[in-house]
Image: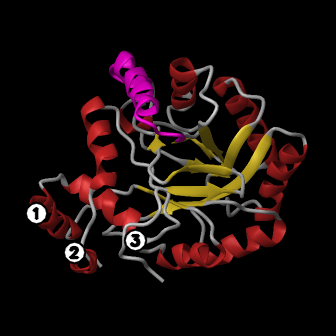
Amino acid sequence: MRSHEKSSRMITIGGDLTVHRLGFGAMRITGAGTWGPPPDRGQALAVLRAAIDAGVDFIDTADSYGPNVSEELIAEALYPYPANLVIATKGGLTRPGPNEWDGNGRPKHLRAALEGSLKRLRLERIDLYQFHRPDPSVPLEESLGVLVEAQRAGKIRHIGISNVTVAQLAQARRFTTIVSVQNRYNAEDRTSDDVLAACERVHLPFMPWAPIARGEAMQTLEKIARTHNATTQQVAIAWLLQRSPMMLVIPGTGSLAHLKENLAATEITLSNDEVSSIG
């Protein structure tokens, strides 16, 4: 069931981590194609610090962003971390080159990925560690077993999962406690509607990656944006926040101006008719 009314600004992950429902995705602070260092390292660091100064308390990253670059920049900019900051990262992909992403759910790779993330982020325990994508060549339970092992060792607080079907989510939840899901979702791409609905039924936070729509949906977003004297990106974020109370939206940017615009999207309330027109 969808709520078209402005809902709570906060969401709880795993029963003990309460954060704002608008966080920051740290994918775009790297170079072109999510590869290598950013064109302006100083600005990337400034964006991270400005996000925290503005009240952001949830950052999503991954070892594959750069690779390694995003995690290194987060630590450089923000360590020692504010007490209320939740940093989520992911493992399970390798990077042959710019815009190339290969899955690797083998236990050996995931153990190394986790240890690398802990070192780069300068953490003894990661609050939310997400399996980046199920690997068809490795049983899901085998991949998740590494994370459960690390959780028991105190290296992971909570386990999340990303890029999954409803069946894979159910399979993962039978094996261990899953506290969040991150799938592609925006006004144009609703292929994970069933996964979002499954999350709503059991109150799991859902993080939509690629939250800004392209294609035909942009026309509707542009029309609504003019009404609110806002950008289409702001309307897209506002729509996601109103689409479901389980949405934890993580738009990313390497620009201070765009960061400010994204954060201002929380002040936009769409009417029921506007939400319905987007779909």
Q: Secondary structure at mark 2?
A: helix
Instruction: Tell which of 48 and 173 is nearer to you.
Output: 48
Corner quadrant of residue 216 = bottom left
Instruction: Tell which of 217 and 50 is nearer to you.
Output: 50
Q: Is residue 211 left or right of residue 198?
A: left
Colour pattern: secondary structure
Depicted 16 relative to depicted 85: above or below: below
Residue 93 place in picture, x, y as percent = 61, 46
Q: Is residue 7 left or right of residue 89?
A: left
The crowd level at tag 1 (other Cα within 10 Å; few <14, some 14-19, many 20+) is few
State if disc 2 and disc 1 touch (CB < 8 Å): yes
Q: Amino acid at mark 2?
A: Glu
Classify the position of the C terminus by image quarter.
bottom left
Residue at which label 3 appears: 243
Distance, label 2 to label 3, CA atoms, is: 11 Å
Q: Amino acid at mark 1?
A: Thr
Q: Which residues are magenta?
A: 37-58
Is residue 87 in view from this perspective? Answer: yes
Residue at which label 1 appears: 227
Residue at which label 2 appears: 274
Distance, label 1 to label 3, CA atoms, is: 19 Å
Residue at 39% over, 18% down:
41
Residue 163 place in picture, x, y as percent = 56, 62
State if disc 3 and disc 2 touch (CB < 8 Å): no
Q: Earlier in the sequence, mark 2 or mark 3?
A: 3
